[in-house]
Amino acid sequence: MRKDATAIVGIGETEFAKRLAPSEKALACRAILAALADAGIAPGEVDGFASYTMENTDEVEIAKNIGAGDVTFFSQIGYGGGAGPACIGHLAMAVATGQCRVGVAWRSRKRGSGGRPWAGAHQASASATWTRPHGLLRPVDEIALLTRRYMHEYGATREHLANVAIAVRKAANRNPRAIMHARPLRRDEYMSARWISEPLCLFDNCLETDGALACVVVSAERARDCRRVPVFVHSFAQGLPRQHHTMVNYWCEDPLRGPAWTCAQQLYRGSDIRPQDVDVAQLYDAFTPLVPLSLEGYGFCAPGEAGAFVEHGGLEVGGGRLPCNTSGGSLSEAYVHGINLINEGVRQLRGESTSQVPGARTCLVTAGEGVPTSAMLLRN
């Protein structure tokens, strides 16, 4: 994909809450219309869509309800939390190759109101035959086992995981949109929290949230005429390592070298930006250990060094090595399969974040580690 050929020109979102009254379709339409209004683009100009395979509302219903025109491109990306940046990347490729002119990516979810999807998707794979009998019933159980391996190999501790949880909670405390806006997190509170799946406690897990978010993608040329300062899609990649087993990649040669490593190689191959050039990052954080794994996978530190990287406020705005998840992320703002990380990346490069990194010019946004994943580099 040609660097900087497309741009995100509009973002929108609904409120976030444990339970919201509107349907997922209604929430999706609200977020999409808000993103189009942010861009100054009429709904009738939309001719491209990208969403998650786990989305319960399809593009047919969305197009009818927002008043879209003829749609000439639509796609869906699998693997839940691995899909966010890929939705933008697919739209960027479609716009750049003339398949559509105005693309919309969205995710709408009522996880706070609904049941748990643990029996679907990756759990239906053959690997579940070998893991469920041993107690790996939920995603948190699968990540807990991977976390224990990381601790064993590199000497990481719960203190390092606490550093992640506390850093993103501080960002949420500055963000009025965040579920955890008014709830600071103390270290002793983290250390005494109940187990969810040892060594992961309550605060190592993402929120259960209702809400929806959307982004609008157009060509770089069209972006100059839009209402807001464009944020360019500089580079995009997806990653699925050889012989990968989704979420339970324990029997490969190195279980700690996950999809992020494959994705990062492709991401930087098509980029002028390197890890040392990234001003702010939005790293997928359904669970705290995914952040150190991503720091290593995307090249910010060597294997085993992420624990030290997050010490002494390493992820915080103002003196941190790499400010991360500056809206509060999935752990403390909302969990909508990571698409809120994209919107926050755009806000950072517009200079509009509630935890603004001064002079931010570049942002890395990643999807889930442990599943076939995606990432993108944004610049202003």
Image (cartoon, grey):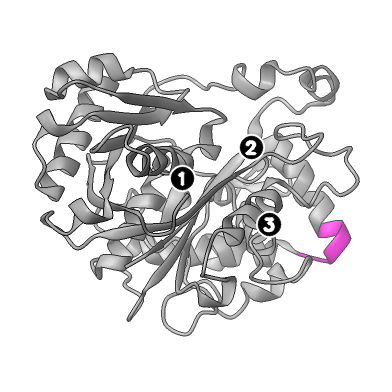
Query: Measuring 32% from the left and 40% from the top, which residue is drawn there?
Result: 95
Is 155 colored magenta in this rendering? yes
Left or right side of 118 for 47? left
Q: CA distance from mark 1 to mark 2?
A: 12 Å
Q: CA distance from mark 2 to mark 3?
A: 14 Å
* Mark 1 in CB contact with mark 2 (< 8 angstroms): no
Q: CA distance from mark 1 to mark 3?
A: 18 Å
Answer with mark 1 or mark 3, whichever residue precedes in sequence: 1
The residue that label 3 is drawn on is 293
Q: Amino acid at mark 2?
A: Pro
Q: Amino acid at mark 3?
A: Leu
Quick one: SS at disc 2? loop
Q: Amino acid at mark 1?
A: Pro
Q: Is residue 228 above or below residue 104?
A: below
The residue that label 1 is drawn on is 85
Residue 109: mark in rendering: none
Give whichever of 249, 93 is nearer the camera: 93
Query: Measuring 82% from the left and 46% from the top, which residue is drawn there?
Result: 255
Which percent across, then down, holds residue 195?
66, 44
The residue that label 2 is drawn on is 372
Q: Is residue 182 visible?
A: no
